[in-house]
Image: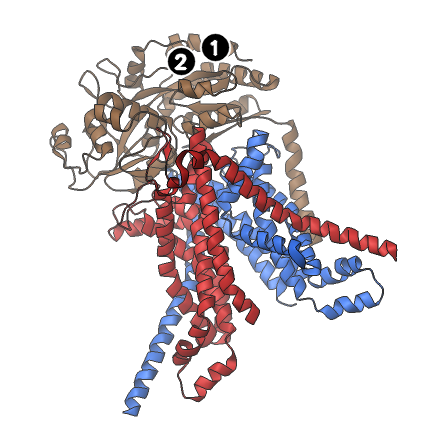
Chain colours: A brown, B red, C blue
Amino acid sequence: MKRALNLIALAVLLAAPAAARMKTLNGAGATFPYPIYSKWFDEYHTVKPDLQINYQSIGSGGGIRQITERTVDFGATDGPMTNQQQFKVDGKILHIPTVLGAVVPAYNLKGVEDLKLSGQVLADIFLGRITRWTDPSIAKLNAGAALPDAAITVVHRSDGSGTTYCFVDYLAKASAEWKKKVGVATAVNWPVGLGGKGNEGVAGLVKQTPNALGYVELIYAKQNDIAYASVQNKAGKFVKASIPSVTAAAAGAAMPKDYRVSITDAAGEAAYPISTFTWLLIYEKNPADKGEALRDFLRWMLKDGQTMAGALGYAPLPDSVKAMVAKTIESIK
Amino acid sequence: MTAERAGDRLFRMSVAGFAGVVPLAAAALAWQLARESASTWKTFGPAFLWTLTWDPVADVFGALPFLYGTAVSSLLALLIAVPLGVGAAVFLTELAPKRLADLLMFAVELLAAVPSVILGLMGIFILVPLMRALGSPYGVGMLTAGLILAFMVLPYITAITREVLLTVPRPLKEAMYALGATRWEVVRAVSLPFSRSGIVGAVFLSLGRALGETMAVTMVIGNTPRISAALHDPGYSMAAVIANELAEAASDAHLSALVAIGLTLMAVTIVVNGAARLLLYRLEARG
Amino acid sequence: MNDAVYARRRKVNALMFALTAACAAVSAGSLLMILGYIVWKGASSVSWAFLVNLPKPVGEQGGGIVNAIVGSAKVVGLAGLVGAPVGVLGGVYLSEYGRGKYAFAVRYAADVMNGVPSIVVGLFAYALIVHPMKRFSALAGSAALAFIMIPTVLRSTEEFLRLVPGTIREAALALGVPRWKVTAFVVVPTAGRGILTGALLALARVSGETAPLVFTAFGNRFADNGWLNPIATLPHTIYTYAISPYEDWHNQAWAAALILMFFVLSVNLAARLWLKPS
């Protein structure tokens, strides 16, 4: 008995002292930018070895909740906080845009290479109005494709999600019925479908379920070889999500001072319609050492971090936005 | 002499203090859950329990889909595990040679030690594809969850039923043998009827486990808050919705509704476990 | 006629024998199947590098789970250090002094807590520790696990102490030894093996718990982060890796499952084999 206890005590003691010297920043939120964030925090740890930035991808809803409760040092979301949510915060939370990404309709259909979908059709599928792949409205957009005579397995998020926000924000613009019946938020009351936890969970479900259709951040489709559809934009063109098409969607947007902007269903021939900025949520006033650490990281993110975005399928911030953000960063205390 | 008494009293008081941690924690737990879910009960009343909608956008919450998913998956689990477990216990107690029985029993007990997340892992990568191959549209769903849960409760049913069967008085059995009964006839006419309440107790205890099981269910039930009569359709359970949504409930009403589900779940398991203890108490008194 | 009846009875007997044997084979065999499958899937991904490295950024191949191994050791270790003694001392109270209303309340509460789903205990630890302290932490995770351990250890300790023959107590008391010394130095050591077995089994059980850690320990990419920061654990890591879309993470989930299973089963085996001789 004693020996066992000694061993446990030893293990505990061994683990403890290292921690004292190490500074930690804890963050949580969006799964949408998780691949690029985990890359950044990994790289930044090599730049600043005495700082650990721990990021847990629990969903944007969670990011907003946890930063509001101050259980984390920073949050992350890809659906901006609503006025009502901001009203509840004790203090002021800044939205710092970090990169741009695209939400893609990811599907699992054997032999269908390039599926084409419109906003209306997507909305109808997620409303449960279109239930089979052979539905005429899908067939019309995909002349010649070998669509299976099978039911569509709809996959959506089970958690509060900015990816959801971006996706349903687009659906609400494309379908009046969606806007009326379901609405726009980080978590909605889904009319049909299976729930997966996080972008990871949805991608996992789509990948493992034949005839499934879900929505994930572009990188999750790319990293996992999941096919994704082209979506018809405002100009009527079918556009596949890519760094140029996302950048094009952002080009037309006028960036407001608080950075809360929606760029779904953007105008422009080349614009991908389900694009969004993704934001870090940071208090304007932080405990002394943390404010400085956050500022340092954000400066690094604007300079070195942006160069890593492309490799992971995210579009870097436009120069005009970078200049704005650089100023905002200096206001963090 | 007085010094000794003082020492005794000190010792008794301090161990009593440590024992007190448990009722204290139980009371604090109940109080916390009641307090944090109060606004839900105030807003929706008891109708919370039979409302179908779970809509975080409109802040309208009802627990019915989760109650349904929990109940259906747990009952499915029992439907599968009870005959298996009782059969196994009968074999291990009455029919198998002792050494074989000991060995098998050991394996069954270790099965109970397998962490639920590992069963969930097996569920995702073995059971779900298997169910899909067998014609289930999604693979995940209430039936899949029920199957995984069956594996979780099987060891409990087997072990407790075996304990119960072991308390059957030998003379009763021997009397039957003397009449020329076969082993199975003895099991059917003496052992099982004699053990009925104990077996029902085992079933309730397993039900209590199944109701509260979280990870394995979350991983395979489909996480869809809807009620469907088809068993292979996806559903949601009370424990799973708490695990999925607690850290990210965006509004206070949402958080409160989740805690209300937690409170409900706790109340249900207390009732079920209470019933199990009542049934097994008779056994304890006997053996 | 009689022969026919007898033959039928014998047939039914044989049939039921076979059926129940099949039930037993399924019950015991599923353990072998689970173990075999985990070893088969997990062994190829377990390597020294896997055990001592931190995870790679999402989507990159390789990396390890040292954060989860250290995290589980810390969280479960602290839960055991707190939970086992409290449970044992409480159990001593129940067996040696446990009559009356107070003892009834303790026993009743312990039975209730034993049945409360672990996710609800996690909810409690969140409200009790995470929320007021404004942080997810290893401490909160340990507290949740300790809450699960204490009632189990308490009841098993009581059971084993009750097995100590009354004559041993009486003999020691007759020598004029104070009662508390008899309890602490005679009764408890006599049941020592049993008590320790109960504590070890409880420890093994909580080391596989995931649900109460999801919103208490929360997870961490790094290994050295003290008690007041979020921390990774093996079960939670298995969960997040399993539901991810990454093949590499799936393999790592199996490998982590192998490690967790190895730990849980060794503790179980050790506890059971050790108890046997007494």
- Tag 2–tag 1 contact (CB < 8 Å): yes
Tell whether C73 sits left or right of A101. Answer: right
Q: Which residue is mark 2?
A: A259
What's under tag 2, amino acid-wise? Tyr
Residue C70 showing in the rendered view: no
What's under tag 1, amino acid-wise? Thr
Number of the label disc, if any, that sits on residue C116: none
Residue at 59% in and 59% down: C270
Residue at 41% in and 17% down: A83
Percent from the top left, x then y, of residue C80? 62, 47
* Between discs 2 and 1, the one toward the N terminus: 2
Percent from the top left, x then y, of residue A57? 44, 31
Percent from the top left, x then y, of residue B159? 49, 64
Q: Residue furthest right?
A: B1
Q: Which residue is mark 1?
A: A328
Residue B134 showing in the rendered view: yes
> How many marks can you see?
2
Percent from the top left, x then y, of residue C278? 66, 67
Residues B229 and C45: in front is: B229
Residues B243 and A9: in front is: B243
Q: CA distance from mark 2 to mark 1?
A: 10 Å
Residues B206 and A212: in front is: B206
**Quadrant housing residue C172:** bottom right
Tell me the crowding category of disc 2: few under 14, some 14 to 19, or many 20 or more residues within 10 angstroms, Cα based. Answer: some
Q: Please, which chain is the residue tagged with disc 1 on?
A: A
